[in-house]
Image (cartoon, rainbow, N blue to C red):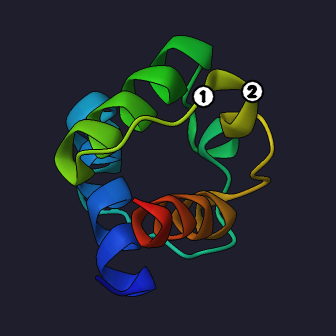
Amino acid sequence: MTKMEVLDLIAKHAREILPDLHQYQFNASDRLVDLGANSVDRAEIAMLVQESLGLSVSRIELFGPKNIGDLADLFLQKLHVA
């Protein structure tokens, strides 16, 4: 899986949770909080992505990424370790 595929997966689940972003073109530098996602929304998006990828990432690790590009990198790193 590529970083672009993981970014697309994050965008897909973000659109499911935040319907106002249906037409939004996501960039790796986007921060979910800046796009209107509250803490519950962000946790749900992360959970959905993890389920889609068959991963389990600790909550502490999920606090590290500053934007969705960093989040995609974290998921990719976990995929390569699994």
Q: Is residue 10 above or below residue 81?
A: above
Q: Secondary structure at mark 1?
A: loop
Q: Nearer the viewer, residue 40 or 5?
A: 5
What is the quadrant of the N terminus in the image? bottom left
Q: Is residue 25 among the parts visible in the rendering? A: no
Q: Is residue 70 above or below residue 13?
A: below
Q: Residue at x 64, y 23 (%)?
A: 59
Spot occupied by residue 13 in the image (x, y as percentages of width and height): 26, 44
Spot occupied by residue 34 in the image (x, y as percentages of width and height): 69, 43
Q: Which residue is mark 2?
A: 60
Q: Residue at x 70, y 58 (%)?
A: 67
**Which three-letter amino acid code belongs to the residue tagged 1?**
Ser
Q: Secondary structure at mark 2?
A: helix
Total numbered badges shown on the rendered structure: 2
Q: Which mark is residue 58?
A: 1
Q: Residues within 10 Å of mark 1 (few under 14, many from 20)?
A: few
User: Quick check: 78 left or right of 13?
Assistant: right
**Which three-letter amino acid code belongs to the residue tagged 2?**
Ile
